C-alpha cells in the first residue's frame, strides 16, 4: 500500500514513519541513531524515503586495541584502556575507553587471619565487541566477572555472576592459560535483535568435555543452562580453549573440539548446536591452530609453534576461510610470510584482517626494564615475483617494517585487537 509523501508540520520537514503519523525529520533521525548500525541498514530497505532519511554514513569498524597498563616502579596493574585506531595508514589512534584503577587482587591469609594483597597474574580482559558495545571480563574474580560497556556513552551494565562461580578454581590442566575470559564469547543476532554472552564450561574436565552451555541475554535477569547436544560425533562436545572462541556478525559462535578436530557452530538465536565442520587440515606436531574472523566469515589459522625463534625464515602461516568465494567448505585464502629475525611479532587476535591490513603485536611483554608492547599495521600485498602455491591464495609478507600504531605507557601489555564501531545505543534499555 502506497504511503503518502510527508507533509510539512509548522513549516518543518517531516518523515512518514507510518501512515497517518508524521515526525519531524530531525527527531526521526535521532531515534534511528539510538539503534545499532546493523538495524539501521535494514531499515533503509523499508522505502526510498526511509533510505534517504536513515544515516548511511555510519563509521566503518576500526581496530580496537585492549591494553593493560602497569606501574614502572611497583609493576602493579594501574588501569585498562581501549585504543581505537582510526587511520591504519598514518597510524592515528585515540583512547576510546579507560577503566578506573584496577582493583588490587586479595587473598585470605591463614597466618595473618586477614585478606592481604595478592597478584595472581590475572588481568582484566576483553571478551569481544558487538555494534559498538564492549564485553569485558575481570579474570581476578572466580569464574570471571562480566560487564558490558558503551565507550561512547560511558554506560556500564554488570552481568550477574554464573551460579556457583564463587567456589570455582582455575584448572591449568584443561588448556586455560590466559584466564577465565577465554571461555566466554559476546554475540549479537540481528534478526532477534539480542545481545548474548555465551559461556563454554570446558575447564572442569581435563578432556575439555561438557554437556551444557550457559547463556545470558542482555535484559534478562539470569543465566540459562542450554544443552550442548547436537550433531557432534560421539554425542558430546569438547572445546580447545587455546584455539579461541569466535562469534560472527550473523549470530553464530564457533569453537574447535579437543579430540575430533572439528569446528562446532552454536546458533545464538536458537541456542543450539547447529552443525559441525571438519577442519581443513589434520593435527600436525609443531603447529598451533587458531580460529579467527576474516571479513565477517570464520577463519582458521595454522602456524608454527614459536615461529619467531626458528632458524629458517620465512615461516609460513596459512589461513583458510569457511564459505568464501561461493564455496560451502574451506578455501585456502592467505599465506603469510613472517620475516622477523630481530623484532619478534605475532598476528593480533581475534581478527585476521582490518581494512586491507594485517595487524601484529610484539611478543615481548613488559618487564623490570620498562618494556612495552606495540601494534603494527602491514598492508596486504602480493609477494612480487613469487608463484602462488595454490590458485586464489594471496601471499602476504610481514617484515620488521610496519606502521606503529598503539604506543602504551612505559609498562603495558596488548591483550587483543578487536573491531569497533561507535554507537549511541543506550545500555539502560537492557537493565532487567
Image (tube, helix red, strand yellow):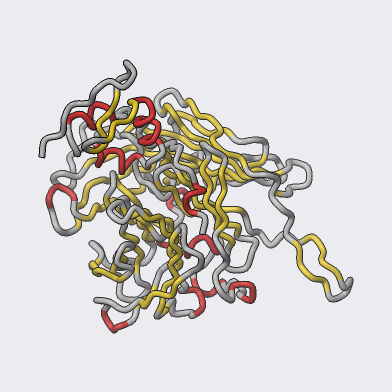
Residue 328 as seen in the image, left or right of residue 280:
left
Q: Quadrant of the N terminus?
A: top left
Q: Nearer the viewer, residue 381 or 78?
A: 78
Question: Can residue 300 be seen from the camera position used here?
Answer: no
Residue 273, image x, y percentages: 29, 71
Q: Nearer the viewer, residue 214 or 348?
A: 214
Residue ID at (78%, 46%): 74
Q: Is residue 82 depicted above or below 302 in this figure? A: above
> Image quadrant of residue 82?
top right
Residue 107, image x, y percentages: 76, 67
Residue ID at (62%, 68%): 142
Residue 257 as seen in the image, left or right of residue 164:
left
Q: Nearer the viewer, residue 127 or 422?
A: 422
Residue 61, image x, y percentages: 38, 37
Residue 150 as seen in the image, left or right of residue 411:
left
Q: Nearer the viewer, residue 340 or 228?
A: 228
Question: Can residue 360 be seen from the camera position used here?
Answer: yes
Amino acid at each position: 500500500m502506497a504511503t503518502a509523501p510527508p507533509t510539512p508540520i509548522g513549516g518543518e520537514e517531516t518523515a512518514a514513519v507510518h501512515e497517518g503519523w508524521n515526525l519531524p525529520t530531525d527527531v526521526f533521525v535521532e531515534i534511528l541513531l539510538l539503534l545499532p548500525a546493523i538495524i539501521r541498514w535494514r531499515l533503509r530497505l523499508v522505502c526510498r524515503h526511509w533510505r534517504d532519511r536513515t544515516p548511511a554514513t555510519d563509521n566503518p569498524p576500526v581496530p580496537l586495541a585492549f591494553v593493560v597498563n602497569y606501574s614502572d616502579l611497583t609493576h602493579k596493574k594501574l588501569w585498562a584502556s581501549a585504543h581505537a585506531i582510526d587511520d591504519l595508514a598514518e597510524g592515528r589512534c585515540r583512547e576510546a575507553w579507560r577503566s578506573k584503577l584496577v582493583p588490587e587482587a586479595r587473598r585470605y591469609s591463614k597466618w595473618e587471619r586477614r585478606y592481604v594483597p595478592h597478584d595472581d597474574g590475572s588481568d582484566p580482559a576483553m571478551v569481544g565487541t558487538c555494534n559498538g558495545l564492549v564485553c569485558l571480563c575481570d579474570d581476578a574474580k572466580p569464574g570471571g566477572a562480566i560487564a558490558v560497556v558503551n565507550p561512547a556513552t560511558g554506560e556500564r551494565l554488570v552481568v550477574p555472576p554464573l551460579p556457583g562461580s564463587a567456589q570455582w578454581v582455575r584448572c591449568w590442566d584443561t588448556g586455560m592459560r590466559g584466564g577465565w575470559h577465554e571461555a566466554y564469547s559476546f554475540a549479537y543476532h540481528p534478526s532477534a535483535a539480542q545481545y548474548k554472552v555465551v559461556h563454554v564450561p570446558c575447564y572442569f574436565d581435563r578432556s575439555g568435555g561438557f554437556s551444557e552451555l550457559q547463556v545470558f541475554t542482555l535484559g534478562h535477569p539470569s543465566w540459562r543452562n542450554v544443552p550442548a547436544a547436537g550433531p557432534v560425533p560421539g554425542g558430546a562436545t569438547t572445546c580447545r580453549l587455546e584455539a579461541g572462541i569466535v562469534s560472527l556478525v550473523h549470530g553464530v559462535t564457533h569453537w574447535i573440539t579437543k579430540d575430533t578436530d572439528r569446528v562446532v557452530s552454536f546458533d545464538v538465536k536458537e541456542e543450539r548446536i547447529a552443525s559441525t565442520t571438519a577442519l581443513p587440515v589434520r593435527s600436525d606436531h609443531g603447529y598451533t591452530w587458531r580460529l579467527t574472523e576474516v571479513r565477517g566469515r570464520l577463519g582458521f589459522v595454522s602456524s608454527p609453534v614459536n615461529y619467531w625463534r626458528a632458524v629458517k625464515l620465512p615461516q609460513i602461516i596459512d589461513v583458510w576461510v569457511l564459505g568464501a568465494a561461493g564455496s560451502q567448505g574451506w578455501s585456502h585464502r592467505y599465506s603469510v610470510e613472517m620475516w622477523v629475525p630481530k623484532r619478534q611479532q605475532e598476528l593480533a587476535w581475534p581478527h585476521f584482517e582490518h581494512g586491507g591490513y594485517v595487524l601484529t603485536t610484539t611478543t615481548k611483554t613488559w618487564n623490570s626494564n620498562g618494556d612495552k608492547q606495540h601494534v603494527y599495521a602491514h598492508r596486504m600485498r602480493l609477494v612480487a615475483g613469487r608463484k602462488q602455491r595454490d590458485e586464489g591464495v594471496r601471499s602476504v609478507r610481514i617484515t620488521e617494517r610496519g606502521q606503529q600504531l598503539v604506543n602504551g605507557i612505559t609498562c603495558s601489555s596488548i591483550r587483543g585487537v578487536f573491531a569497533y564501531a561507535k554507537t549511541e545505543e543506550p545500555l539502560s534499555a537492557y537493565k532487567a
